Image (tube, grey):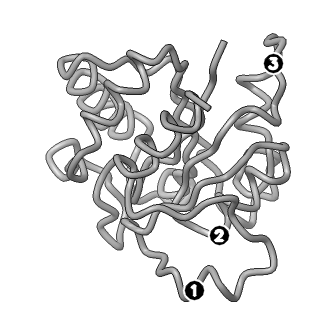
Amino acid sequence: MKLIFLDRDGVINKDLNTYVSRSEDFEFLPGVLEALKRLTMAGYEIVIVSNQAGIAKGIYTENELDQVNIKMVKAIEKAGAKISRVEYCLHADSDNCSCRKPKTGLFKRVLDKKDIDISRVYFIGDKESDVIAGKNIGCKTILVLCGKTKEVDASHWQTKPDCIKKDLKDAVLWLLSEDIK
């Protein structure tokens, strides 16, 4: 089994510099649906792991998050791709939970009953906390530059990604070419 973790905001959809709290505000980034279809066709189990602290902060409700998620998954399925699971951390930083990235609780929920070599799994994200989370669980990490992070920012991080790509489509094309090797 091939497994891949993806962050949501800034990787799959536009990061609005605020919370994506309404389904009508959710907008896929260019090339994402094609990239997800390629992963699905290549036999990857795709899991989304995302911090959604807007709920803990009272900015939006779990029901509103569910509506965004439903819209996203339906559009992905319509494009010929499949999302296996979506795991969200609904806590604020101050809650000190075990699931808020860069901690690994979201990943552990998925990995709990899987017999998988985590060192062969990739996590694609757009922030330093994503890279740290991936490294903390033992994944290989790909930083995409279609969110808030610039390559120059990543050059100053103590924890470096294994790979940096322009966006999800670029990352998936690279990953699938690595699969062939």
Q: Is residue 171 above or below residue 42?
A: below
Residue 115, percent from left and from top: 84, 12
What residue is rendered at 33% in x and 36% in y? 35
Is disc 2 surrounded by few (<14), some (14 to 19) or many (20+) residues within 10 Å? many
Return the residue at label 3.
116
Where does the image place residue 127, in percent across and percent down from the top left? 57, 67
Between 113 and 145, the one lying in front of the other is 145
Mark 2–mark 1 distance (CA, rounded to whole Å) = 9 Å
Q: Nearer the viewer, mark 3 or mark 2?
A: 3
Q: Which mark is residue 153?
A: 1
Residue plotted at (35% across, 26% down): 38
> Label 3 to label 2, Cα distance in Å?
25 Å
Q: Amino acid at mark 3?
A: Ile
Contact, CB < 8 Å: mark 2 with mark 1? yes
Give the residue number, with chain letter if any, for mark 2.
Answer: 128
Quadrant in which the N terminus is drawn: top right
Indicate the quadrant containing the C terminus: top left, top right, bottom left or bottom right.
top right
Q: How crowded is the residue under tag 1: few (<14 C-alpha within 10 Å), some, or many (20+)?
A: few
| Dot 3 or dot 2, earlier in sequence | 3
Three-letter amino acid code at the position of disc 2: Glu
Residue drawn at x 28%, y 59% as measured from the top left: 14
Q: Looking at numbered disc 1 in the image, what kind of residue is underneath it?
A: Asp
Looking at the image, residue 25 sits to the left or right of residue 11; the answer is left
Query: Which residue is more in the foreground, 73 or 163?
Result: 163
Q: How far is the residue under mark 3 from the one under mark 1?
A: 32 Å
| First along the sequence among labels 2 and 1 | 2
- Is residue 133 left or right of 4 when viewed as pictured? right
In the foreground, 181 or 156: 181
